[in-house]
Image (cartoon, helix red, strand yellow):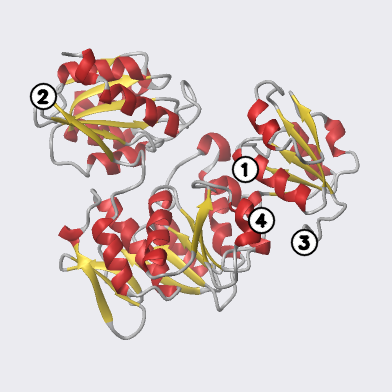
Amino acid sequence: MTRDLSGKRAVVLGLARQGVAMARFLAHAGAQVTVSDLKTKAELADAVAALADLPIRFALGGHPMSLLRGTDFICVSGGVPLDIPLLVEAQKKGIPLVSDAQLFLERCPATLIGITGSAGKTTTTALVGEMCRAAGRRTWVGGNIGNPLLDDLEDIAPGDLVVMELSSFQLELVTVSPPVAAVLNITPNHLDRHKTMEAYIAAKRRIVAFQKPEDWAILGFDDAHARTLALETPAQVVFFSGGTQVDRGAYKTNGQLALRLGEREEVICHREEVRLRGAHNLLNILAACALAGVVGVPVEAMRQVARTFPGVEHRLEFVREWRGVQWYDDSIATAPERVVAALRSFTEPIVLLAGGRDKKLPWEEFAREAVQRVRYLITFGEAGEMIAGKVEETMRATLGQLESIQRVRTLEEAVEAAARVARPGDVVLLSPGGTSFDAFRDFAERGDRFKELVRSLATSHE
């Protein structure tokens, strides 16, 4: 449907990073492109300027129904929900909806590795990219992480490797799967968008649903939803596990990370050699090794990366030590489950900063973990009061080491409070559990602001 784009009339909804890339790609391919966004031209000045040299029409400040007139297909950016009136009407009229992922997957000439999961997909994507490069392969990394790969398409050669992070939003519309696809885990997330867990799982499933028998599906064995997908893909299945020695795949055994893709087990490295903190990051490394292995990356390259990879920004990122206290930025933790994984990565007493905007997810496990592992909890943002309330309920029923809960309004106030209560030997951890949209553009902006505040502590508290 979107193979031959010349002369086709296309509407691009959403002028963020993905929308700009889709508009540019379609215009270069000869399509007649109209871009629509709820924001005004003034609010989107930079994005509009980036497309100024192309014959693109703009309908900004809303999504008028007139956009559907004569349209061949609509390209939907990940941030645009599929239940807005314009898209509901488009589907009634039989107008196809596509994503940037669909456009790229249809056209990528190289071996493509697609990675999705509720947690860990960015770190795993970065690890696979580094392993492929360590093996001397020309490698492109992008998608939901970093740059939209549509911008690189004309430079990608058949002998290259492409590592693509795919979100549930991107996968909702795809009708083609990557030849090498990973589902790391599927736990409650983005239910404010998908409404039900069933709809969320259905979106994730699409990464393997259209695979062929010669393709590869790499699945998290320890996650029931991911493991079950082995029954739904025609591809060859490889597992990774932190607790089970799988027949084919990557696993932890006797304190070592190992890989078995043929008859022989190969040791990648010892668990203590891994630089990344946390059991969840061991799983990310095992997933990366399984993915790299099926595209021919030697174990030596995997070992090199597993021993040296420092992590991805805003993911348990060490910021600094100040007055005997270590400060960590885990702003990517926009779901309670991710905070639980972060808390389990430390043995030190924790001062936890949690808050932001809730995604309608369950907080009970978080509350239990916080009572047991956190010394001092500071909540902030829209969800701060709700989070504090959940933890207080658990404190009344469960003994733990949590000494106190403090409520503040902003991240700035949270950092100030943490600086006052943290003791030498503590870890101060920003791991919010909610999105950043109550106060910041995205989790990266929130993490950057946190690091800025932490680095200024030397002057502001002397």
Mark 1 or mark 4, earlier in chain:
1
For this rendering, which residue is in front, 161 or 398?
Answer: 161
Which residue shows up at 81% across the image and 28% down it?
64
Name the residue carrying label 1. Answer: 18
Q: Disc 4 or 2, which lies upstream in sequence?
A: 4
For the N terminus, the quadrant is bottom right
Q: Is 90 positioned to the left or the right of 441 in the image? A: right
Q: Residue 390, percent across and down?
A: 31, 25
What's the CA distance linking mark 2 and mark 1? 44 Å
Q: Which mark is residue 169?
A: none
Task: State whether residue 403 appears in this view.
Answer: yes
* Residue 199 position (above or below residue 206): above
Q: Compared with residue 380, is residue 163 higher up or lower down, i.e. above or below?
A: below
Give the Cα separation between the discs numbered 3 and 2: 60 Å
Of the 4 image quadrants, the one containing the C terminus is top left
SS label for mark 1: helix
The total of numbered circles placed on residues is: 4
Q: Earlier in the sequence, mark 1 or mark 3?
A: 3
Along the polypeptide, which appears first: circle 2 or circle 1?
Answer: 1
**Which dot, 2 or 1, sits closer to the camera?**
1
**Residue at mark 1 to residue at mark 4: CA–CA distance:** 12 Å
The secondary element bearing badge 2 is classed as loop
Q: Position of residue 336 (x, y in %)?
A: 36, 36
> Label 1 is placed on what type of residue?
Gln
| Picture coordinates of residue 213, whole percent (x, y) | 57, 78
Mark 4 secondary-structure assignment:
helix
Q: Which residue is mark 2?
A: 423
Q: From the viewer's perspective, is 416 left or right of 15?
A: left
Give the residue number, with chain letter if any, for mark 3. Answer: 3
Image point 71% across, 33% down: which residue? 84
Q: Quadrant of residue 107?
A: bottom right
- Nearer to the camera, 99 or 225: 99
